[in-house]
Amino acid sequence: MQRADRVAVGGLVAFVLWTFVVLPFYYGPRDNSAAQKCSAKESENYDFWEKARCDPIAYFTLWLVGFTGVLAVSTIGLWIVTWRAGVRQSRDTAALIGERRRLGEAQVRAYVRIKSVNVDFLLDAVVPRVAFIASNSGQSPARNFLWNVTVQYAASDINRVSAFNPYWLYETGIDIPATSDAPPEAALIPNIAVRQCVPPSTMITVIRLKIEFRFTDVFDKDWFGEAYFAGTMRLTPATSEGFPAGVGRWQAQVSPVPKPRDWDQVRDMS
């Protein structure tokens, strides 16, 4: 029982006790017949409550008024308690329906993640190309899948950052079927060519990636996600045995990482 309900019931009990216990005990007719007989002259100076002690009709009238008041207060109190209970039940029912709907949608909606990432260097072996595969593990399609890639050379003496498409949210994406991988995506990252950003004497440096994406589920709700990767890029002599043809002299290996603490301070410097 809520506090307001307890107060209402307590007030009702107090009113009943006052009407049927206190008033009859103090103002009600006495067993002593002498106390019940009041002369007209004596009654002239009595108020209503004092007269009720002597006059049974007045006492009955007092009791009837009190009983009517109790009924009125009881009815109002019962209506208030019933109304509050109905409000609570409606609120609880709405919350239960909302929770069931949320759980139902969570079971069948799309879930997208970045499954794999690869970084190589093209165009005279200095321009980074980021290729990745997105995967939908949900039970329904991910519609209008959009994405963007940001690359950072994270060494303190370099700290160069560039994004593939700053306006990626205004594009039109693809649909990823349920429990399926999307076709491979790839992007050449502009304004971050190695020879323009990395000092000539550098043989190894840190590279970081952020892949951000958005898709719409079957309930027309937009979902946003981010995936972060980090690793090293190395300058490999072109005469090394087994060097992949067409890739160039720079090679990079990246792995998934948690969001770097300083990533929010990273700004596109292209």
Image: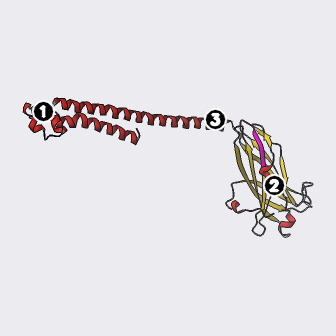
Per the picture, the main secondary structure of the magenta-coloured stretch is: strand
Which of pointers 2 and 3 lies earlier in the amino acid sequence?
3
Q: Separation of disc 3 and disc 1 at Cα?
A: 72 Å
Q: Tags 2 and 3 in contact by the CB under 8 Å rule?
A: no
Residue beneath disc 1: 30
Q: Amino acid at mark 1?
A: Arg
Is residue 121 shown left or right of residue 84? right
Circle 1 sits in a helix, a strand or a loop, which is it?
Answer: loop
Q: Amino acid at mark 3?
A: Gly
Determine crowd level at label 3: few under 14, some 14-19, many 20+ residues with C-alpha closer than 10 A. few
Q: Residue at x 10, y 35 (%)?
A: 40
- Say if 170 sits above or below 263 in the image: above
Is residue 13 shown left or right of residue 261? left
Which of pointers 3 and 1 lies earlier in the amino acid sequence?
1
Determine crowd level at label 2: few under 14, some 14-19, many 20+ residues with C-alpha closer than 10 A. some
Residue beneath disc 3: 104
* Percent x, y of residue 71: 32, 31
Q: Nearer the viewer, residue 43 or 106?
A: 43
